[in-house]
Image: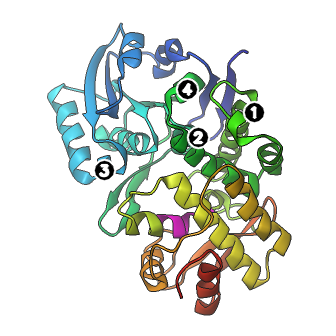
């Protein structure tokens, strides 16, 4: 099957290529004039396939810690020092090779070095392909929460090589489906239909069903980002790019409470079920769609309940969410399938009841 190219429109348009064995496409995405390339990758991930594709460039190897532990100011600073020591200029580039955390950190380093150098993302996880690598959001974490420091910096291109998913642990692949199914609820119900008629075990790196899910989720994100790159809002009441944060307010609070020991896609699944319950209590969402959240995420093996923290602890963490305004919590919710909207200032009674509905302690 031939490669699929999805164009992300906007001020600096770029291509997302989906297919198998794509490493040889990397030089064409870097653009002319690049002589040095820094490859940011987790310490435990062999990046030799990327280094081989960059044989005509001077390559700076930048291994970083695995997972969310990489997304700190200290790790970013160590990368800046390495770029400076190697004499990187604005005509040089960064390539990220890894999961969502690597993409976030490497993108942030590229965005801030000399106020911005080219970056190409080569995500190796399902989560990275459908979420972190597309859209130009970069970020690191602080003690107060996730992704609170960051920048918008669009990549020069993205290579989603589905072959890399063949060695991904099954739990990681399933976690990535959290962001995919989220896209089904906010924009493309065909994703939900495909998930509901496909046996979960059939969603593998080589399956046409998984490829279709990846391409559909990327198109959802590409369409939203093209219309609202910097999250300033959409037209006709649509929340714009904020819609992509569906489920993320509680998800980020859970991740922080768990010290990032829970996978992002798992937390997103719980967060989506939570806001569906919240919207149901606020009277904006039909009970059948609320129930479909439980069944769709649960079908592929994602968690749909959480009892690991007191409501008060998560409530405090949610108040630091980027969508909050002053002391008012704001949630992306649904009015119906593919009809996202914003619920501002829900009552504490509804917030508590929704948490209880997903198994949270009273």
Residue placed most toward the observer, 275 or 153: 275
Please tell me which of labels 2 and 4 falls first in the chain: 2
Please tell me which of labels 3 and 2 falls first in the chain: 2
Task: Give above or below for 361 relative to 238.
Answer: below
**Which residue is disc 3 drawn over?**
69
Q: Circle 1 sits in a helix, a strand or a loop, which is it?
A: helix
Label 2 CA crowd tier, 10 Å (few <14, some 14–19, many 20+): few
Q: Circle 4 sits in a helix, a strand or a loop, which is it?
A: helix
Range drawn in magenta: 246-252
Instruction: Tell me which secondary structure the magenta stretch mostly adopts.
Output: helix
Measure how far apart labels 3 and 2 are at the Cα level: 32 Å
**Which residue is disc 2 drawn over?**
11
**Which label number is shown at residue 70?**
none
Asked if residue 250 lies in the magenta stretch, the reply is yes
Label 3 CA crowd tier, 10 Å (few <14, some 14–19, many 20+): some
Q: Nearer the viewer, mark 1 or mark 2?
A: 1
Q: Residue at x 71, y 27 (%)?
A: 207
Q: Circle 2 sits in a helix, a strand or a loop, which is it?
A: loop
Q: Residue at x 19, y 41 (%)?
A: 78
Label 4 CA crowd tier, 10 Å (few <14, some 14–19, many 20+): some
Label 1 CA crowd tier, 10 Å (few <14, some 14–19, many 20+): some
**Which residue is disc 1 drawn over?**
209
Q: Residue at x 70, y 40 (%)?
A: 219
Please tell me which of labels 1 and 3 falls first in the chain: 3
Contact (CB < 8 A) between labels 3 and 4?
no
């Amino acid at each position: 099957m031939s490669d699929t190219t999805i164009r992300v429109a906007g001020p600096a348009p770029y291509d997302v290529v989906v297919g198998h064995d794509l490493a040889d496409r990397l030089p064409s995405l870097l653009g002319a004039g690049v002589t040095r390339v820094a490859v940011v990758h987790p310490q435990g991930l062999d990046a030799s396939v990327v280094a081989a594709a960059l044989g005509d460039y001077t390559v700076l190897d930048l291994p970083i810690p695995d997972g969310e532990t990489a997304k700190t100011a200290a790790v970013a600073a160590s990368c800046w020092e390495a770029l400076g020591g190697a004499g990187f200029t604005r005509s040089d580039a960064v390539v990220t090779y890894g999961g969502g955390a690597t993409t976030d950190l490497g993108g942030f380093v590229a965005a801030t070095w000399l106020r911005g150098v080219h970056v190409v993302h080569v995500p190796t996880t399902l989560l990275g392909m459908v979420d972190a690598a597309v859209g130009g959001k970069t970020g690191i974490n602080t003690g107060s929460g996730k992704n609170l420091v960051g920048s918008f910096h669009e990549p020069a291109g993205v290579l989603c090589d589905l072959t890399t998913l063949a060695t991904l642990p099954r739990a990681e692949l399933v976690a990535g489906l959290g962001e995919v199914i989220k896209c089904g609820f906010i924009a493309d119900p065909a994703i939900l239909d495909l998930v509901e008629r496909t046996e979960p075990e059939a969603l593998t790196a080589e399956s046409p069903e998984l490829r279709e899910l990846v391409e559909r989720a990327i198109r959802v994100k590409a369409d939203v980002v093209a219309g609202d790159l910097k999250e300033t809002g959409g037209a006709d009441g649509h929340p714009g790019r904020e819609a992509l944060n569906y489920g993320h307010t509680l998800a980020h609070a859970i991740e922080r409470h768990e010290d990032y020991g829970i996978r992002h896609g798992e937390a997103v699944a719980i967060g989506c079920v939570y806001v569906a319950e919240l919207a149901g209590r606020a009277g904006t969402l039909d009970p059948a769609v609320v129930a479909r959240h439980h069944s769709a995420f649960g079908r592929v093996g994602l968690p749909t309940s959480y009892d690991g923290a007191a409501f008060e602890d998560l409530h405090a963490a949610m108040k630091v969410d980027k969508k909050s305004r002053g002391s008012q919590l704001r949630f992306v919710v649904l009015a119906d399938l593919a009809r996202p909207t914003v619920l501002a200032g829900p009552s504490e009674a509804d917030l508590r009841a929704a948490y209880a509905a997903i198994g949270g302690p009273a």
